[in-house]
């Protein structure tokens, strides 16, 4: 199947799904209207909803340092936008998105859902064999944490705040629209900047906690929740310096 329009994976409605960049779709469809005018009109006219049909990120990394909104569309929204153009290109794009959906449906194995009971049973089994160690414990904790974050939804706000946070969590708090790749790229450098400021101010290294990162148990810096008012501006300054946050 030809790669007519690039696809990427984005989190939408608490799920990772295939999406298409609206700018790429606009170019492929050969729409004569300016991109910003076109996408805003289409969203208003057809009642598309942010975080359900699409996600929108603001980007300051372009040459002119002007704010640019990037829209990542679900394939359902992309199909509808293609169809309403009523052109040969629109028909071709819609057929392409249908083929992409079919390819994922038939190529992706249907794995059993990982439930907390499932994890508990396997932990007990490994413990009986005497092979359950700290690496397994951290991995299971990471799976449980991820599952809870995805399932909590509306009740998450009612949960008590954690006693502390790491740099990735801090970045998510000050810039919720950062993508997973942006977080992976900038967490390390942002963490170094915060740690340097911390050492300069307090004269010692930050506390650490363990995380299961890239298949290994690693120590990561851990900051008390009461320090957020001091750390947030440092993270905001870092993100602004790399063009990911408007000043």
Image (cartoon, rainbow, N blue to C red):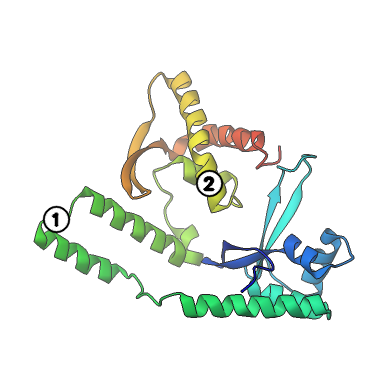
Task: Give coordinates of residue 85: x percent, y percent.
Answer: 83, 77
- Please tell me in which quadrant of the rendered image residue 17 appears: bottom right
Distance of label 2 from label 1 (alpha carbons): 33 Å
Question: Image height check: is 132 above or below 223?
Answer: below
Residue for point 30% across, 54% down? 139
On the image, the x and y values in percent for residue 70 come to 71, 56
Mark linked to residue 131: 1
Return the mark for residue 183: 2
Local crowd at mark 1 within 10 Å, few (<14), some, or many (≥20)? few
Left or right of residue 137: residue 175: right
Residue 115, above or below 136: below
163 or 215: nearer the viewer = 215
N-terminal-most mark, 2 or 1: 1
- Residue furthest out toward the right: 32
Q: Nearer the viewer, residue 190 or 82?
A: 82
| Quarter holding residue 238 | top right
Report the front residue among 5 and 120. 5
Q: How many marks?
A: 2
Residue at disc 1, secondary structure? loop
Residue visible at 77% across and 67% down in the picture: 28
Residue under the point 69% across and 66% down: 5
**Residue farthest to the front?**
2
Looking at the figure, which quarter contains the N terminus? Answer: bottom right
Q: Secondary structure at mark 2?
A: helix
Image-based side of 64 in relation to 206, left or right: right
Mark 2 and mark 1 in contact? Answer it, CB < 8 Å: no
Percent across and percent down for residue 19 are 62, 66
For this rendering, which residue is in front, 31 or 208?
31
Q: Is residue 143 visible?
A: yes
Q: Is residue 246 above or below residue 148?
A: above
Q: Position of residue 127 (x, y in %)?
A: 13, 59
């Amino acid at each position: 199947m030809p790669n007519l329009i690039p696809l990427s994976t984005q989190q939408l409605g608490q799920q990772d799904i295939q999406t298409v960049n609206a700018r790429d779709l606009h170019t492929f469809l050969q729409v004569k209207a300016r991109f910003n005018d076109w996408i805003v009109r289409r969203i208003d006219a057809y009642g598309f909803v942010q975080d359900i049909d699409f996600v929108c990120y603001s980007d300051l990394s372009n040459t002119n340092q002007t704010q640019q909104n990037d829209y990542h569309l679900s394939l359902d929204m992309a199909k509808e936008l293609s169809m309403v153009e009523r052109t040969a290109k629109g028909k071709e794009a819609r057929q392409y998105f249908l083929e992409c959906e079919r390819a994922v449906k038939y190529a992706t194995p249907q794995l059993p859902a990982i439930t907390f009971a499932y994890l508990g049973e396997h932990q007990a089994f490994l413990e009986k064999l005497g092979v359950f160690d700290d690496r397994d414990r951290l991995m299971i904790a990471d799976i449980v944490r991820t599952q809870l974050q995805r399932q909590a939804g509306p009740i998450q706000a009612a949960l008590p705040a954690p006693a502390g946070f790491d740099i990735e969590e801090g970045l998510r708090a000050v810039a919720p629209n950062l993508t997973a790749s942006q977080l992976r790229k900038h967490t390390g450098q942002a963490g170094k900047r915060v740690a340097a400021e911390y050492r300069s101010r307090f004269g010692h290294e930050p506390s650490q906690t363990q995380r299961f990162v890239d298949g290994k148990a690693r120590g990561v810096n851990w900051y008390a929740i009461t320090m957020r008012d001091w750390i947030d501006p440092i993270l905001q300054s870092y993100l602004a310096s790399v063009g990911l946050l408007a000043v």
